[in-house]
Amino acid sequence: MAGQIPHEELPILEAVINIRNRLTALKKNRAEFIKASDVNSLYQAVVKQVSKLNDVRNDNDIYNNRLDTTLADVFTLLSLDTPAIYSQIASMRSGVYNESDLAPFQRRLSDLRQIVQRDATAGKHPESLTKLLERQLGECDGIVRSLQEGLSVLSPELIPIHERLVNIRRHLVALAAKEGSHKAELKPLQEELRKIDSKRVDGRFLGPGGMVPSSQAVCSSLLEECFEIAQEIKANEDSKNVPSSLKPIHDRLSEIRAELEGLVLTHRWSLRETDLWNYSLSLQEIDKMRVDGKFLDSEGNRPEGQYVLLYLLRRCYGLIYRLLSSSEPVSEELMPIANKLNTVKKCLNEVLKYGGPFSPRDLYPYQLALHQIESMRKDGKFIGIDGSIPEGQGIVMAHLNECHELIEMLKEAMDEPEGEDDDDEEYDDEDDDSS
């Protein structure tokens, strides 16, 4: 996560943003050729800001804030290689890589170091720019070393599974970026994910003799992420068929989701339940628009596009849960309810992950469990033994609402035509990144 910008770097950031905007404008202007003099003047302006940056920074520290990412954008526009390779490597910190992915970066870093040293000897760039490039090369070396160390903790038994999951994720991401329908290409990838998932016993991959290899979390989180991307692909395809009558709801939910995801990335450590009240209220208002769990048009008909709306609702409630769970405690009185909801949510995710066919009877135990939890509320709140309102109301309600959306998604899958079951029912999501 990018760090906060020190006060002394703010003027430099403002100047670099201005340079980036001017470079972008030059690149987009197809009406006339780009003049070398224009690019050179901007290059000199960048060098001036880099000199100022070097003056306020300690050579021994590693920096990663908005100024660094903006500088990387500027250097990319100027076609300077080192910041571009730095950005590529930094993006791999997610853990979605294998040994073969690192080798090209190691070779490229070696080549870049030689280029920087040769240019420095020839006096091609100002000393301040060379200093910045050498610092970023050092950071890249450190990132590669940490990535290699991350792979070294993988037990030999899990390396084949990890490599296969990395490749599946790569295919899924490529599918998500393509236009058109992906059902035929998506299905075999989902089937392979289910096969890998079926190798787990009580949520763990086992080695020879039933031993539990280390680095379970790396493979399990990668597996769940693959299921999440698969569901995202389905929801994105369904969003193209949302009728005009449901478009305002779809757009509003997409907007809320984007804002919540932004909060997860930037402010989750300082949030409180009151900060998310408007988001919860908006979701509740959208929820109340449903009739028997379905969104209707102005004529009272149930149009297509239900699944993607339910998916977005669920993701929003899940994001609120994640945000609150990182900053708000759950009282001891509410822990039994939270634990029961966690169990129900895991079971529903397994049903959603593996798909049908299933019937309303299959969902009844989960609906009964949620009904029992709902009946414990008074005036919308969970009340303590002494009549007080325990902490953690928002977390538990977000969890409860997410479970309800899972139920509705499963109902919607049951209502889909028989011929689409194989392609359209079988999706997991995030989970349980927070559970």
Image (cartoon, grey):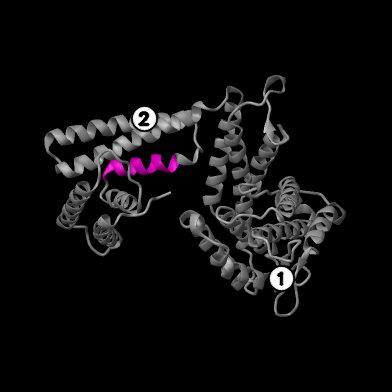
Please identify the residue farthest to the right as the structure is shown: 361
Q: Which residue is mark 1?
A: 295
N-term-proximal mark, 1 vs 2: 2
In the depicted view, which residue is nearer to us: 369 or 118? 369
In the depicted view, which residue is nearer to us: 415 or 200? 200
Where is residue 254? Give x, y as percent. Answer: 56, 64
Q: Is residue 366 above or below residue 58?
A: below
Where is residue 169? Give x, y as percent. Answer: 56, 41
Q: Quarter-wise, where is residue 135 in the image?
A: top left
* Residue 64 badge: none
User: Is the Cβ of the residue at disc 1 closer than 8 Å to that at disc 2?
Assistant: no
Where is residue 238? Give x, y as percent. Answer: 64, 60
Q: Determine the secondary structure under disc 2.
A: helix
Circle 1 packing at 10 Å, graded few (<14), some (14-19), many (20+), is many
Amino acid type at mark 1? Phe
Q: Is residue 395 magenta-colored?
A: no
Q: Is residue 272 above or below residue 122?
A: below
Where is residue 326? Give x, y as percent. Answer: 56, 52
Q: Which residue is mark 2?
A: 106
Q: Determine the secondary structure under disc 1.
A: loop
Amino acid type at mark 2? Gln
In the depicted view, which residue is nearer to us: 24 or 282? 282
Q: From which residue to which does the magenta span run?
A: 80-92
Q: Is residue 90 magenta-colored?
A: yes
Q: Quarter-wise, where is residue 116 in the image?
A: top left
Q: Does 398 sit left or right of 72 as displayed?
A: right
Please identify the residue farthest to the bottom as the structure is shown: 299
Look at 63% across and 43% down and name the residue there.
Answer: 224
Q: Quarter-wise, where is residue 303 in the image?
A: bottom right
Q: Main secondary structure of the magenta part?
A: helix
